[in-house]
Image: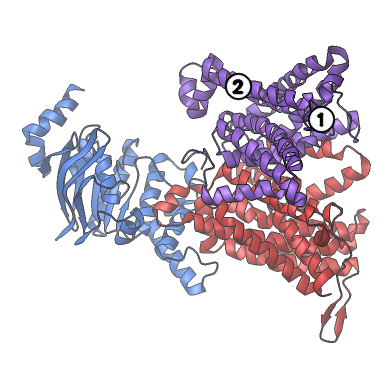
Amino acid sequence: MTQLLLFNAFNGLIQGAFYALMALGLALILSLNSVINMAHGGFLVIGAYLAYVFAPYVGFAGAIVLGPLGAAAIGMVVERVLIRPLYKRPDPLYTLLLTFGLALVIQDLTRTIWGPTGLPFEVPQILASPVSTVFFFITGYRLLVVALVAVAVIGLFLLLRRTPLGIRIRAGTLDLETVSALGVNIYMLRALNFALGCLLAGLAGVLAAGVLGLTPPMGNSLIMPSFVAIIVGGVGSLVGAILGGLLIGLAAGITTTFYPAASEAVIYLIMLIVLVVRPRGLLGHEGLFE
Amino acid sequence: MMRDERLWMALGWIVLALAPWWLPWLGGYSALGTKVLVYGLGVMALNLLLGFAGGLSFGHAAYFGLGAYGAGMTLKYLAPSTPLALLAGTVVGGLAATAFGPLVMRRRGIYFAMITIAIGQLLYFVAVRWNEFTGGEDGLAGFSRQPLHFGGWVLDIRDENKYYYVVLVCFTVAAWIMRGVLRSPLGHTWVAIRENRRRAEFLGVRADLYIWAAFAISGTFMALAGALNALLFNFTSPQDLHWILSGDFVIMIVLGGMRNFWGPLLGALIYIVAQDYLSSVTDNWMTFIGLLFMVIVLAFPRGILGLLRRRGKAAA
Amino acid sequence: MSLLRLDRVSRHFGKLQAVQDVSFEMNEGELRAIIGPNGAGKTTFFNLITGFVPPTSGDVWFAGESIRDKAVVYRVKKGIVRTFQITEVFPDLSVYENVRFGVETAAGVNGRPWLPRAKRLELARRTDELIEVVGLAAKADRVVSELAHGDQRVVEIAIALTMNPRLLLLDEPTAGMGDAETDHMVDLIRRLHSERKLSILFIEHDMSIVFGIAQKITVLDHGRLLAEGTAAEVSVDPQVRAAYLGEEAKA
């Protein structure tokens, strides 16, 4: 029982790490681009399938780097061509619908190009085997996932706090007009920010592919919990998005042990409880995005 | 202008009433016509919240699906009565919308959309996982709409054409009620809140309570549409609660014109016929639908009726 | 009889003393102007009267009742109605729809999904009447956002009138207007005062308007009450000249 609980809790944490990566990217795009990116799951899929395509040429490690970079590059083009014309319309409805349509296109094209059935994403043998016989579920790959997510998160926070780009992004989320008045090219800033969000989605995709395999709708099952992670953590807070993602992942994992049928619903129940008890989310700010 | 609108409404209604005759002639079929009316009713209900009160719900499929499951499960487990099934579906969906309304009524824009999406997904997973009653991923089957009894006279609505008229009657009554509400002080208050919530609140209007009312009423009529849809196909599945359907609803509204009462019906007509046609000619219909989304957003944000109205103004 | 009375009212924002120890009294039926240089505390003064901010100390009386702790909405129901420095209307609705919403709100029927015919006609008549009063009858069906700025401000006054004000507060009613628009607004204020017997308190920068129509003028400076009196009295007050008119002379 204890082992089963640990197994599920660890699975939940891995899942939560994916949610957190997705939620971070969504939250970045939400706060600076004011876009609810419904295509975020699509960028996850792009990252995963690009890694699958690159892997035979550049090896596993190279694919883990190139997949997300490819997603980011495509994200930048999408932002430039499709989303930029919509910034002048303040109603979030339009970008929501646009990215929604984009999500459908990405899913359908993925299915057409690589087929509707799942594809395996080969993990090197050395990473695929368990590190201990007692904790059979802890493979080298899963440890790598945890490590890479941690590196990505720390990297992101260093970027936001220490680099000129990151400081501008943070300032832009607070007051875009002022940042613009200071001579910052806010179009470039938002394009880079969108690409950064897609990079995180792509990374989540590559890492998830090694655990769950590749399927065209794989993004769909990850994007909704990521929204919930943001709502639970508090809209406008990046730390909240990580916390929310890990929390609901863990909760879903633990619920699987006792009542598997409710493992998805529990995520949304947590959200409802948070909304009732603390409407702004765990770390949300008063009045933001009201 | 008033008289103009009445004339158009009368004409439109006659065209709808004769649909079973002219539809086959155009290569359509009654069930397609019924589907347009059902979805039209649903998106007009959603537009009451979205276009008039300004509440961006991206999870309204939840109430459509609840109406469908409510009706289907009533027929399957409770009683073989069509009116009871429709009533039960409508009430279940309406009550759910009333219960969830307070969670979003103080929110706006992005936050409102995200929370409504997530609430919809909660209900989706309940339908998927509560196998014994809902049929899980495979959907709920094993029920069928029953003949209507009026005293001694029986109307066998298992016939598709006759069911079309049942839906047309429901649609007409529901549209008449919604139109009345939107022309009442309640409807005026919703529009005022959409336009300038702060200003309305300074005048003493409790905006959150009115948004709640809009959410509940909108959810109720959406549930009626869901119930009618379940009886149309004698089937429902978790796809009827999924966020993808919620997105379809919203694009139908934008396509037709969200500032117009009848716009969503027009949007539903075009969208459903296009979907029906595309899925019969290409496997990649999803790509075309997705591209349609983008074209509408980038090129026709005011929708068809919005565009026509603009043209009219420019000409006059 | 005094309609509005402020008793040694102060309001701080952190270290900033927006309004300091101001006592003020205004009678029923009076047309009063508030003037003062930028940052004198005029808008805060308005916010204290309308309840948008509570006073740090002191008391506010309206029609014999202390309203110090009452919410904005309560004060609106009692008849304290204001317009804003930045026009606050319902931009995508017609003039008629803007005013009708106010009329329905004042009648307390907002939540009704249905109205009897008689009531509907009564509210429509009231809407028409108010649009007539402010002189927008010819533009009743126009969308407000497409009207000239001056007309938009008139719509805002019409919305305020729907609430049956006893005291109407106008925050810079002619700001940003051309000459013709200003004349129209001044005429409207004068008519509301003389024909409808409204008590009106307004903030204004244009001295020709203030001296032209106000019966009495209150001068604020750095949050303090500097002077009070008729146009003739205020214009010769040495303190006012130093603080306010002097500044204008320099500019």
Q: For the residue marked with disc 2, what is the amino acid?
A: Ile
Query: Does the image show residue B3?
Result: no
Q: Determine whether, in the image, residue B141 is placed left or right of residue A284.
A: right
Q: Which residue is mark 2?
A: A154
Mark 2 vs 1, N-terminal side: 1
Q: Position of residue B68 (x, y in %)?
A: 77, 61
Quadrant in which residue A75 is drawn: top right
For the colour purple, the matching chain is: A
Q: Determine whether, in the image, residue A287 is placed left or right of residue B220.
A: left
Q: Determine whether, in the image, residue A143 is placed left or right of residue B28.
A: left
Chain letter, disc 1 residue: A
Q: At 49% across and 38% down in the image, what residue appears? A: A288
Q: Which residue is mark 1?
A: A133
Q: At 87% across and 71% down in the image, what residue appears? A: B157
Crowd rating for badge 2 (residues with CA inside 10 Å; few <14, some 14–19, many 20+) = few
Chain letter, disc 2 residue: A
For the colour blue, the matching chain is: C
Q: Position of residue B251 (x, y in %)?
A: 71, 45
Q: Secondary structure at mark 1?
A: loop
Q: At 10% across and 36% down in the image, what residue appears? A: C235
Crowd rating for badge 1 (residues with CA inside 10 Å; few <14, some 14–19, many 20+) = few
Residue situated in front as seen by the camera: B26 or C186: B26
Query: Does the image show residue B116?
Result: yes
- Marks 2 and 1 belong to one chain: yes
Residue situated in front as seen by the camera: A130 or A240: A130
Q: Determine whether, in the image, residue C113 is placed left or right of residue C8.
A: right
Residue A26 position (above or below residue C93): above
